[in-house]
Amino acid sequence: MSVTANNPIMPGFYPDPSICAVGEDYYLVNSTFAYFPGLPVLHSRDLAHWEQIGNVLDRPSQLPLEATGHSRGLFAPTIRYHEGTFYCICTNVSYGGNFYVTAKDPAGPWSEPVYLEGADGIDPSLFFDTDGKCYYIGTHPNPDGCRYNGDYYIWIQELDLEQGKLVGEVHNVWNGAMKQIVWPEGPHLYKIGDYYYIMNAEGGTGPEHAETICRSKNLFGPYENNFCNPIITHRHLGKDYPIKYVGHGDLVQTPAGEWYMVMLAVRPLEGFTTMGRETFMAKVTWENDWPIVNVGVGMLTDTISIDLPEWIPEKSCCENDSVYDFTAMSELGPEFLALRRPADDFAKLQEGSGLELKYTKTTLREEATPSYLAIRQKHHHFNAECDVCTDSVTEGRAGIALVQSNEYHMRVELTKVFGTEQLIAEVILCENGTDRSMGEVTVANKPVITVGIRVDGLQASAHVDGITVTDKLDVRNLSTEVAGGFVGCTVGLYAVTDRETQASARFSRLAYTV
């Protein structure tokens, strides 16, 4: 019995994947940078179909993100399981550095962070050796001094979990497979057969990204380079190849003994990436104690045949359509995201009437906490729309937004003209931190008005109650190549005001359809 997985296995903004297996269950986590809650926990039993069961960091006490840039915050988590406990280790580059949390149930709750003194650098991982000892592996600047930007070393040190401290000697063990390599990062340490393996990314997380591996019969080396490195990359396929930036992998083995690798890659259109880095998968076989990724192919494939029985989750993360009737919901799902550190009650479901989103004077242009509740963009072509209850549009502006960062986003805002019953919908495009009005329309006042954004590749249109306000708007600037950073676009509800108020905008529905 087998199942077919489609690449990407997690479409949309799911970068820096890490995976672990516990019996017949598989758990995956991804980076979230400045979004809250942090680090989604995804579950599968066949590696093809995934459901989100929670978030690792879902309490403000776990995740300080104040004034954090969109592509700062949480970098490159690793999830591991050992003797009944799940461990997730990560870097908060904005606050505190490297830390780990634990849980008995991967759905949560997870513990408060344990910050590791002396753990400089980024991209930590944990390794449990056969003697029960735990080791930290990460990357930091060349201890002899950086000769160029990106001159980093991978290092290993024992971690005493009872004390929550690094102990013993620091061992700088590897600085990449190739000469003058930049950014050896995302290292993972494994013991497979007679060898310890360090698998890591190199070349930066852009067009030159690659995954390499080395091995040793001793934990602290010396490590032997694989002459077939890199074991997976698309950097040699040219700038127009439809899947790029391949790297940052993690390995997992099934109970039947098959091996697979999850990794990140992007799917740009005409050279522009709006969905960010996504999670892909490949099959791994072993020859001469070295891994071969997609044997006979050497690159990512559209599908992967997996020797596991098909498993269908209750709510798949990869469904094309997501429709939320807030009037019938009692709680928000774990897939919803906010920015930085929202107040506990900034978004609240009111039974029978919808979702209330508190008005705030903080705009999406600020590195702060706007009233923005979103889901990930997962397709190049989609329609996202929300139903706004107009009796709540009295104290500010409410609508929908497509967000790459605080400096690059698109908004469709509904406003009630002061002193009248007249409503105006305005389309605003923010580029390089500057707002431009791209059109507006007067809307007949009624209890509920539908406001939406349609994305077709690198163009977008805005509509209000079926009326097109702006058509064929160029959104190439809402891409990694222009806006920079490591994130993909999200789309969601937005409320903002110019005055002091305790009022909330109310939404009865959010729909994402393809």
Image (cartoon, rainbow, N blue to C red):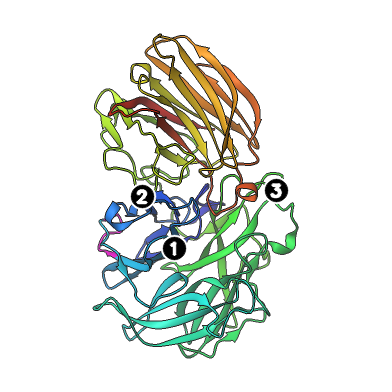
318 sits left or right of 437 in the view:
left
Q: Check disc 1 and give the amino acid type.
A: Val
Q: Residue at the spot x=44%, y=82% of the render? A: 156
* Residue 66 as seen in the image, left or right of residue 149: left
SS type, badge 2: loop
Q: How crowded is mark 2: few (under 14 residues within 10 Å), some or many (20 or more)?
A: many
Query: Would you name the residue on which mark 1 appears?
Result: 93
**Residue 290 visible in the current orientation:** no
Query: Is 484 or 174 nearer to us in this picture?
Result: 484
Q: Which of marks 3 and 1 is nearer the N terminus?
A: 1
Check residue 468 for magenta coloring.
Answer: no
Task: State the SS at label 1.
Answer: loop
Q: Which quadrant of the figure has residue 493? A: top left
Q: Quadrant of the C terminus?
A: top right
Given residues 263 and 429, the one toward you in this image is: 429
Residue 106 belongs to magenta span: yes
Distance CA(mark 3)–CA(mark 1): 29 Å
In the rendered image, the vertical position of residue 275 relative to residue 226, given as above or below: above
What residue lies at 30% left-to-right and 28% top-to-bottom? 501
Q: How crowded is mark 3: few (under 14 residues within 10 Å), some or many (20 or more)?
A: some
Vertical side of 213 occupied by 387: above or below? above
- Label 3 vs label 1, nearer the camera: 1
Residue numbers of the magenta segment: 102-108
What residue is pinned by disc 3? 271
Of the residues shown, which amino acid type is indicated by label 3? Gly
Q: Which residue is label 2 attached to?
A: 37
Foreground: disc 1 or disc 2: 1
